[in-house]
Image (cartoon, helix red, strand yellow):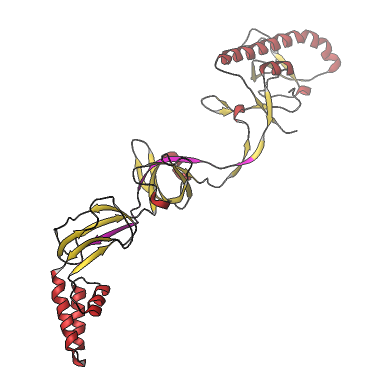
Amino acid sequence: MNPRILVAALVAAGLVAAGGYAMYSIGMNAGMKMAAAPAQGSAQGASNERKVLYWHDPMVPGQKFDKPGKSPFMDMDLVPVYADEGSDEGGVAISSRVQQNLGIRTAAATMGEVAPKLEAVGTVAWNERDVALVQARANGFVEKLHVRAPLDAVRKGQALAELYVPEWVAAQEEYLGAKRIGGAGLEVLREGAAQRMRLAGMSDVQIQLVESTGKVHARTTLAAPIDGVVGELAVREGMTVMSGAPMFRINGLATVWVNAEVPESLAALVRPGNAVEARAAAFPGRTFKGKVSAILPEVNAATRTIKARVELANPGGQLVPGMFATVDFAAAASRQVVMVPTEAVIQTGKRTVVVLAQPGEDG
């Protein structure tokens, strides 16, 4: 017969004192009944020849004595424990009537799979791996801005600014002049002129445009290399820019990071590559899927937490930096454990225990 877990369903704080009293009354009643028993038991002991294993106080069943006498704990006689009764280590017998009055019930302990669950709160941030910088390829002047404010949304290929580059004029005129002269012997000259255009900062597409049109193009249009938002805008119309100067910083929104604060004691449950699901208060009922990108090698001394960098898919760019998100980390490998109802678990403050109903007991 499988052991069953004895669940004590005592209700509210008022029953704590009452429960303690009830258990004490049961012990005293049992003790008085058993104390009176030796007089009758002595008459029957000879006939039954029952073997006494030890004597104990029913209120302190864990303490054993090798001879009868008065209990050092209570004003009562020690009670014998017979061999045919079993030792019943640390047990307490409760009649079925008392169990019914107290509302005691039992439930079977079963084996089941349990996996640890971890939930953490974090803040949405830009994905610093999804960033594009737009720089000036040559010295020039900003003639027109198509994007005028930070955090403006842009699409890939969208015009950002128009630059006038004086250095390109001389290089293009040299190339067009060598092309007009023609002749097989001037091929080296034309290649040299094309190389000077590249050194001036012109791309192959711009060089092909000069060659196909036969005209000088001193102005160039800078386009957005990715979809996203303008994180930084470093120029204004009329400004002079130097070659290599950063003009725009574009942050992609296809994915975002969530820096989740994981308690230091639970950091071992989180590993890079683990799948996660996140929820944001701005989108109730919506979940965003992603994975753990990295565990940052730094512990917050004030909160004793470590940051887990989570990368989330962000369809439609709904998640934006600064939002709070709750992250559910995927459970680690599950393991077989003994499962009991939560009501059966008794929290003592120092340990967690359950009461075991032995086979053959009432209830």
Most extreme residue toward the bottom is 184
Where is 96 relative to 274, above or below? above
Tell me: 113 left or right of 99.
left
Range shown magenta: 112-137
Q: Residue at x 63, y 40 (%)?
A: 112
Q: Residue at x 35, y 52 (%)?
A: 127
Residue 244, x across and y down, in percent: 20, 63
- The C terminus sits in image quarter: top right
Where is 284 relative to 310, above or below? above
Residue 118, x across and y down, in percent: 48, 41
Q: Nearer the viewer, residue 220 or 2?
A: 220
Q: Nearer the viewer, residue 157 or 240?
A: 157
Q: Residue at x 74, y 18 (%)?
A: 96
Where is 316 relative to 163, above or below? above
Residue 50, x across and y down, in percent: 81, 19
Can residue 262 be seen here? The reply is no
Q: Residue at x 45, y 51 (%)?
A: 291
Find residue 224 and report its image quarter: bottom left
Where is 9 relative to 264, above or below? above
Residue 150 is inside the magenta segment = no
Q: Nearer the viewer, residue 127 or 13?
A: 127
Residue 43, x across and y down, in percent: 83, 10
Can residue 121 be seen here? The reply is yes
Q: Main secondary structure of the magenta part?
A: strand
Tell me: 121 left or right of 128.
right
- The N terminus sits in image quarter: top right
Tell me: 28 left or right of 134.
right
Residue 123 is inside the magenta segment = yes
